[in-house]
Amino acid sequence: MLTVLFGAGASYDSDPLKPAPGGDSYRPPLAKELFDRRFASVASRYRQIAAIANDIRRKVDYGENIEAVLANLEQTASEYPVVKSQLMAVRYYLRDLIDESATDWAKQCFGETTYADLVNRLNKWSHGSRKKVNYITFNYDVLLEEALINLGQRFDELEDYIKPPAVGSPNVIRPHGCVRWSQIMKSAFSLSAAPSPDEIISHAGDLTPTDDFTIGQPDRQLFDSQGGRRIAVPAIAIPVDNKSAFICPERHVNTLREILEGTRVLLIIGWRGTDAQFSEELRSRIQPNTDLFACNGSVVESAETIRAVGLSQAQMRPPTDMTFGELSQSKYLQDILQMPSLST
């Protein structure tokens, strides 16, 4: 099967008429831009962000990766419990920021995103060849889902992501969660009947994550079968180095592993290969001689991703300087679809 892996660079460059880089105010942010001052109005909804925003911006401006900055913040939580509330506020902030920016971006291009162009071509190839295409995305936005909905796929339930109703429809795996998902948490503290985000954030240290996820907005209180209090929070993974857990249902993780083991061609678009946990899954499950392609907008960045994932067993194909916007109708993609590994 063909597996396509999307990173933040894909959404950043997802309008074919506005190629990156560009100063468009609606453009979905890259990881390093998540705390830009232009998003301060969104951050101001959560008072805990104000305490950390300037420090995060300074460190990123000095050249530190945002993942490393947030990882260092996370490591201080045991010594400074307030950090747990700050990180929960980051979940809410990222949910709002990504959802709103991606929605505005899609409106600007009337839904005619590069995602829509690419998945239509791959869907047509899949139906004609009877070969499977699967998608893995590290983006929190739903631009990919919207593109697939154009082709008749539905995402009304979490099972629709891994057991699509139509034969030939792709699985969609989201290891880091989604702006439209919620994660159920157990609470050791008595919250109000309809807790506000501020109340949930304030008691973040009393919350324990579960493997229960739902589609829909959080900020509501639930009860388990024993009457224990549970609440729903944004199912968003804080972007840190060396993540220890995926933010998606375990059954999705199991499907992810099956997909990786069955992949014969892996196409990476706009992903830097910096997620240590996922890279380890890749190294342990990708089969020998799998063809690996990277399309990150420049030969240097594409080559860096190929180096970062460290798939010594894969067939590393020459890195390209092609952007996402240039990919879908290119000979480069045509050559990928004609790889001998996809013809067996």
Image (cartoon, helix red, strand yellow):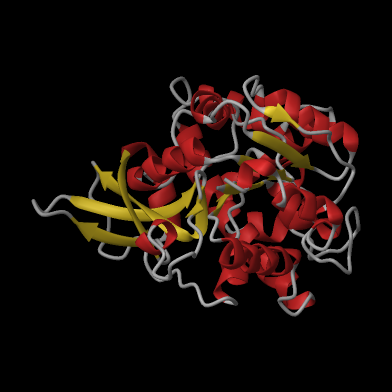
* Total numbered circles: 0
Q: Quadrant of residue 114?
A: bottom right
Taking depth in this image into account, of 172 and 313 the one nearest to the observer is 313
Taking depth in this image into account, of 262 and 59 the one nearest to the observer is 262
From this view, report whether residue 287 is shown above or below residue 35: above
In the shown orientation, is residue 308 left or right of residue 183?
Answer: right
Taking depth in this image into account, of 249 and 93 the one nearest to the observer is 249
Whole-percent x and y of residue 161? 43, 59
Whole-percent x and y of residue 259? 47, 43
| Residue placed furthest toward the left | 226
Whole-percent x and y of residue 62? 84, 28
Residue 277 visible to the viewer: yes
From this view, report whether residue 21 is shown above or below residue 52: below
Q: Which residue lies at the image location 48% right of the left edge and 25% below the top edge?
A: 80
Residue 29 visible to the viewer: no
Whole-percent x and y of residue 238? 55, 40
From this view, report whether residue 102 is shown above or below residue 29: below
| Residue placed furthest toward the front | 344
Q: Quadrant of residue 53?
A: top right
Taking depth in this image into account, of 266 and 236 the one nearest to the observer is 266
**In the rendered image, which quarter contains the C terminus?**
top right
Q: Which residue lies at the image location 81% right of the left edge and 36% below the top edge?
A: 302
Q: Which residue lies at the image location 10% right of the left edge and 54% below the top edge?
A: 225
Q: Quadrant of residue 129?
A: bottom right
In the shown orientation, is residue 18 left or right of residue 312?
Answer: right
In the shown orientation, is residue 214 left or right of residue 8?
Answer: left
From this view, report whether residue 86 is shown above or below residue 114: above
